[in-house]
C-alpha cells in the first residue's frame, strides 16, 4: 500500500479523536478544518453581545478552525475568508472585500440547516462592527490614526470565539457539534456543485477536487505534497494524457483525511533532523519504537555499566517489551518529508513493514552496531550510537561545546542510515572512511568529550561494517590479545604508549601525550612513528616505578611478538580503520586496570 492509503486508514482509525484536545498534543483536525495559532479569544453572550476578550499565549493558542478549499490555500492578497475564526482584517469592516467575503460565507452557514447557536451569535456580533473598539477598550490592540489598520501587526491576529450559554461547551473550537456542523454543511455544498470522480486512494466515488491542503509540516508551512494541476502549459500532458484527470485523481474526502492525518502525525510523532521531518507510526495508534529514539534512554546517566555479555539479554528484553505492545501482523510505517522549494514538499523515503519484520531489523541494528562507550561519569557501558550522532561525528565540525553539521548533509545521511537500520542495507564505505579520518584527528577537538564521542562512534560503525561484510562477528567488543591483525596490533601499541606517558602527569595536567599528537602521522607511517614515540617515551618511563615500567615493557613486547612474520614487509604501510578498535579497547583495558588497582589501594587504606 502507499503512504496515502496508510494515512487514510490512520484517519479512519482515529476519527473519534477528531476535534478532541489532549494536553501536550496537537489535536487531529476534522475534515474541512485546520489547526492555527490564535492570538485573541473573544467571549460573547448567547445573544451575540460582547462579554470579554483576552490574549492567548503560543502554547494556549492552538485552535481548530473551519476552512474552505480556497481559504486554506489562500496567500498574498486573496480575500478568501475562513467561515468562523479568522484574522482581524477579515472580521472588521476596514478591508472591505475581506470583510464582505467573511460575512457572506458566515451568513451562508448561519442561514443553512447546519447552523448552530454559536454561529448565529458570532454573526450578530460581527454585523455590529464593534470588534476593533471592543478590543481597544480591553487593551489588546492600539489603533494609530496615522497608520492604516490593514498594515498594522494586529491585522493578522487570529480571533477565536467563545459563546456563553449557547451549549454545554462554550468554546467554539472545542464544540464538536459546531465542528461537525461545518463539515456536513461544506461537504453537502461541494457535493451539490461538483462532479464525482474515482478516487485512487479510497477506491470509491468521491467529490472531485484539484486543490489540496498544505501545512503538513510546520517548518515548511506553505509546501504541498500534491500540487495544483497546471493546465496552462501546452505540453503538460502531451504524449501521455489529454486531461490531468486521466493520469490520476484524488477525491476531496480522501485528500482531507490523508492530509489531516499526516499533519497530525507530523506534529505529534515527527522528529526533525536537518530540516527533514521523520515520522514512524502504527496506523492503529499503538506505540512504536522510532529509529530516532534512544532505546535505553540517556546513556550518560548510567550508574551501573552494561557489559557486552549483558547487553544481548537486555536488548532482547527491551525489544520484547515493544513487541508486546504491537502484534506481529500490525504495520509500521516510516516516512521522511523534505521541502525542495517553499511550495513543494517531497517524500524522500517511505517504508511499511510488519511489526515482526520491523523489530527484527531494529534488534539486528542495535546488536551489530553496539560498542563500549565511556560516559561523562567515566563508566564504560555498551551502547549503540544514535543515528544523528553518527552523522555529526562523520561529517560535522566542533563549534563551541558541540559538534554541528550542515542541514543538507544531515538530511541526506539520515536517509541513508534509516535504510541501514530498517532495510538492513550495508553502511556506506564513504561514511566509515569519513569517521576514521575524524577519529584520527584528535587535535581538531578542544572539548575532550566531543573527541571521545567521535572515537566511540567510529569504533561502533567500523566494527559493524566489517562484521557485516564477513557476515559473522570477527571483531568483538572486548580486547582480543590473540588477534594478529597488523592494524589492530599497532592500535594496541599506540594505546600503551599513550597510557605510559599520561600516568606520569601531575593531577590536573591536561596536555595530550605524544601518541595522541602524532596520531595522524601514526596512521600513515606506523612503524616509523612508533620508533619516534618510543624515543620520546624514555623520560616518562623513567618516572615510573620499576614494576610498572616492567609491566608496560612486557605488554609492548607481547604485542610485537604477536605480529605475523609476513607483516615485516608492510610494517610501515598505512593502517586500516581497524587500528581504532585495537587502540580503543586496549586503552579501555589499561585504564580499567588502573582504576581497579586504585580502588584496591583505597579499600586497603580504609581497612
Image (cartoon, rainbow, N blue to C red):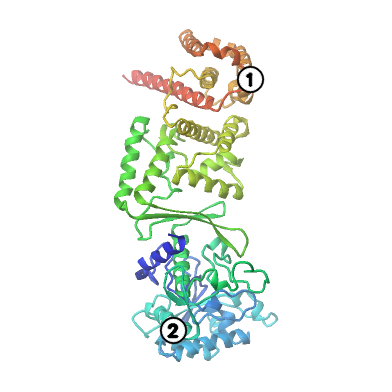
Label 2 – label 1 distance at C-alpha: 78 Å
Please state the total of marks drawn on the protein image: 2
Q: Is residue 301 above or below residue 105?
A: above
Residue lying at 43% horizontally and 21% vertically, measured from the top left: 480
The answer to which image quadrant residue 182 occupies is bottom left
Q: Position of residue 186 (x, y in %)?
A: 46, 82
Residue lying at 52% horizontally and 69% vertically, measured from the top left: 248
Q: Is residue 393 above or below residue 554?
A: below
- Label 1: how many Cα within 10 Å (few below 14, some 14–19, many 20+): some
Q: Residue furthest front?
A: 239
2 or 1: tag closer to the N-terminus = 2
User: Dot 2 corresponds to which residue?
Assistant: 188
Q: Is residue 452 above or below residue 605?
A: below
Q: Which mark is residue 287?
A: none
Cβ–Cβ under 8 Å for marks 2 and 1: no
Quarter of the image where the C terminus is located = top left
Nearer the viewer's eye, disc 2 or disc 1?
A: 2
Q: Is residue 296 visible?
A: no
Mark 1 residue element: loop
Q: Position of residue 154 (x, y in %)?
A: 60, 76
User: Dot 1 corresponds to which residue?
Assistant: 525
Quarter of the image where the N terminus is located = bottom left
- Out of 1 and 491, give the one closest to the viewer: 1
Q: Position of residue 235 (x, y in %)?
A: 67, 69
Amino acid at each position: 500500500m502507499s503512504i496515502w492509503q496508510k494515512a487514510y486508514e490512520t484517519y479512519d482509525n482515529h476519527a473519534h479523536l477528531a476535534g478532541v484536545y489532549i494536553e501536550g498534543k496537537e489535536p487531529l483536525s476534522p475534515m474541512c478544518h485546520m489547526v492555527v495559532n490564535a492570538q485573541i479569544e473573544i467571549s460573547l453572550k448567547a445573544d451575540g453581545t460582547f462579554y470579554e476578550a483576552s490574549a492567548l499565549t503560543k502554547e494556549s493558542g492552538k485552535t481548530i478552525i473551519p476552512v474552505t478549499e480556497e481559504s486554506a490555500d489562500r496567500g498574498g492578497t486573496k480575500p478568501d475568508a475562513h467561515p468562523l475564526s479568522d484574522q482581524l482584517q477579515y472580521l472588521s469592516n476596514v478591508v472591505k472585500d475581506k470583510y464582505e467575503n467573511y460575512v457572506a460565507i458566515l451568513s451562508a452557514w448561519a442561514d443553512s440547516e447546519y447552523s448552530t447557536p454559536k454561529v448565529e451569535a458570532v454573526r450578530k456580533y460581527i454585523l455590529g462592527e464593534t470588534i476593533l473598539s471592543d478590543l481597544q477598550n480591553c487593551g489588546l490592540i492600539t489603533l494609530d490614526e496615522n497608520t492604516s489598520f490593514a498594515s498594522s501587526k494586529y491585522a493578522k491576529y487570529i480571533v477565536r470565539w467563545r459563546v456563553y450559554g449557547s451549549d454545554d461547551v462554550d468554546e467554539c473550537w472545542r464544540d464538536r457539534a459546531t465542528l461537525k456542523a461545518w463539515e456536513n454543511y461544506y461537504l453537502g455544498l461541494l457535493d451539490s456543485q461538483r462532479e464525482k470522480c474515482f478516487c485512487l486512494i479510497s477506491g470509491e466515488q468521491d467529490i472531485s477536487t484539484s486543490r489540496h491542503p498544505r501545512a503538513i509540516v510546520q517548518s515548511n508551512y506553505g509546501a504541498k505534497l500534491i500540487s495544483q494541476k497546471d493546465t496552462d502549459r501546452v505540453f503538460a500532458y502531451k504524449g501521455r494524457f489529454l486531461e490531468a484527470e486521466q493520469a490520476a485523481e484524488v477525491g476531496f474526502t480522501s485528500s482531507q483525511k490523508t492530509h489531516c492525518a499526516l499533519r497530525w502525525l507530523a506534529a505529534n510523532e515527527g522528529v526533525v533532523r536537518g530540516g527533514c521531518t521523520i515520522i514512524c507510526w502504527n496506523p492503529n495508534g499503538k506505540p512504536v519504537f522510532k529509529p530516532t529514539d534512544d532505546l535505553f534512554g540517556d546513556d550518560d546517566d548510567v550508574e551501573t555499566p552494561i557489559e557486552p555479555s549483558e547487553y544481548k539479554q537486555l536488548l532482547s528484553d527491551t525489544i520484547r517489551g515493544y513487541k508486546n505492545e504491537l502484534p506481529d501482523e500490525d504495520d509500521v510505517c516510516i516516512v521522511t518529508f523534505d521541502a525542495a522549494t517553499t511550495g513543494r514538499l517531497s517524500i524522500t523515503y517511505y517504508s511499511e513493514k510488519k511489526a515482526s519484520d520491523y523489530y527484527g531489523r531494529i534488534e539486528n541494528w542495535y546488536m551489530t552496531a553496539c560498542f563500549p562507550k565511556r560516559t561523562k561519569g567515566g563508566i564504560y557501558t555498551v551502547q549503540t550510537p544514535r543515528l544523528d550522532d553518527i552523522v555529526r561525528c562523520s561529517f560535522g565540525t566542533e563549534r563551541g561545546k558541540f559538534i554541528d553539521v550542515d542541514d543538507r548533509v544531515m538530511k541526506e545521511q539520515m536517509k541513508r542510515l534509516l535504510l541501514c537500520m530498517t532495510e538492513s542495507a550495508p553502511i556506506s564505505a564513504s561514511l566509515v572512511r569519513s569517521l576514521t579520518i575524524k577519529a584520527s584527528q584528535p587535535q581538531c577537538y578542544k572539548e575532550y568529550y566531543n573527541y571521545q564521542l567521535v572515537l566511540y562512534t567510529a569504533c561502533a560503525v567500523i566494527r559493524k561494517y566489517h562484521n557485516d561484510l564477513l557476515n559473522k562477528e570477527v571483531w568483538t567488543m572486548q580486547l582480543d590479545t590473540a588477534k594478529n591483525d597488523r592494524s589492530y596490533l599497532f592500535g594496541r601499541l599506540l594505546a600503551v604508549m599513550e597510557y605510559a606517558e599520561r600516568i606520569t602527569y601531575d593531577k590536573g595536567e591536561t596536555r595530550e601525550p605524544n601518541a595522541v599528537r602524532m596520531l595522524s602521522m601514526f596512521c600513515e607511517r606506523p612503524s616509523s612513528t612508533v620508533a619516534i614515540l618510543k624515543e620520546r617515551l624514555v623520560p616518562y618511563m623513567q618516572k615510573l616505578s620499576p614494576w610498572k615500567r616492567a609491566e608496560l615493557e612486557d605488554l609492548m613486547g607481547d604485542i610485537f611478538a604477536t605480529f605475523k612474520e609476513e607483516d615485516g614487509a608492510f610494517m610501515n604501510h598505512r593502517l586500516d580503520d581497524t587500528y581504532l578498535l585495537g587502540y580503543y579497547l586496549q586503552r579501555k583495558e589499561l585504564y580499567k586496570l588502573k582504576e581497579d588497582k586504585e580502588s584496591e589501594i583505597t579499600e586497603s587504606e580504609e581497612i
